[in-house]
Image: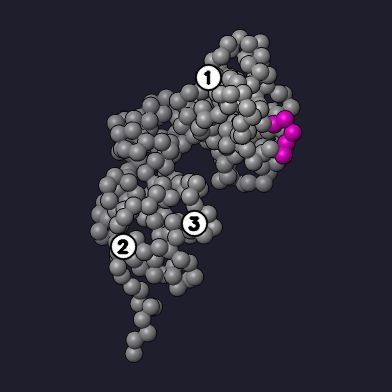
Amino acid sequence: MAEFDTPGHTGSWKGQPGFLAKCFDEKGEPFPQNIIDPTKDENFQFLKDLFTETTLTFPEKFVHLGGDEVDYWTEACWLRNPDVLKFMKEKGFAKNLTLLENYYFERLQKIINFIISDKNGSRMIFWQEVFDNNNPVHDAIIHVWRGNTKTEWGEELDKITAKGHQAILSSCWYLNYINYGPDWKEGPQFYYCDPHSFNGTEEQKELVIGGIAAMWGEFVDATNVEARFWPRASAVAERLWSAPENTTDADKAWPRLHEHRCRMLTRGYRPEPINGPSFCPTEWDLP
């Protein structure tokens, strides 16, 4: 499933003329552009053309539209942009950024609904900020990525499912985070994370349809992505793809993960050692 994050995180879309809003720092100097200009009809036409193509390219019945961290750029690129301010005034938004965000997401969702109307069962997915701050369509799936503690992400899942939305959890599984020792089996993260462990009804918990391991790329590139990803992702997979009663003891999972790492090494992968000092049978050529 591909994600096309909008309206923020779009600096790489600069090749489309006028697509990104002009941004300014506190002194009025130009600031790096990284958010869509929501005032131009032609930008929404571009989004319609783009997503028409992507829905043909990617066969999944889900389209992940992002929507996270919009507030990182709204002040510099919307509130300090004279053209955007004029547009907000004409729309009666004053300087209320939430109203402008709502305007953007409402238009985007209309576009996507039109595109996927003939694809039975197709759904939109948004990061949790769109649920927290805006108005996602009633059948949108909400992707939870924030929250360093079980309490934080549990409260978010409770709110989302109470409104009838299905949810996906990623807060527990940041593969780019590295801690000393076998972090995959310590604390409430990784192996011991249960997406259904929050204060909600059984009906609410049924709306949490799964989890996704996240690999944020700020300090990960082609030189280390393979080692960061494996074999931690295998611990996440076993947790999510197995019956809960079979995944309650990380110590019992340790030998399986070790064996799987050895298997990956023989197949040419370079998974990092995450269980402490050890070796694989293939590393020793004994008579």
The foreground one among 210 and 227 is: 227
The residue under label 1 is: 98
Residue lying at the far front in this picture: please name it.
27
Quarter holding residue 45: top right
CA distance for labels 2 and 3: 19 Å
Q: Quadrant of the C terminus?
A: bottom left
The residue drawn where x is 65% and y is 24% is: 38
The residue under label 3 is: 225
Looking at the rendering, the stretch of residues picked out in magenta corresponds to 15-19
The residue under label 2 is: 275
The first of marks 1 and 3 along the sequence is 1
Quarter holding residue 105: top right
Predominant secondary structure in magenta?
A: loop
123 up-or-down from 237: above or below: above
Q: Amino acid at mark 3?
A: Val
Quarter holding residue 262: bottom left
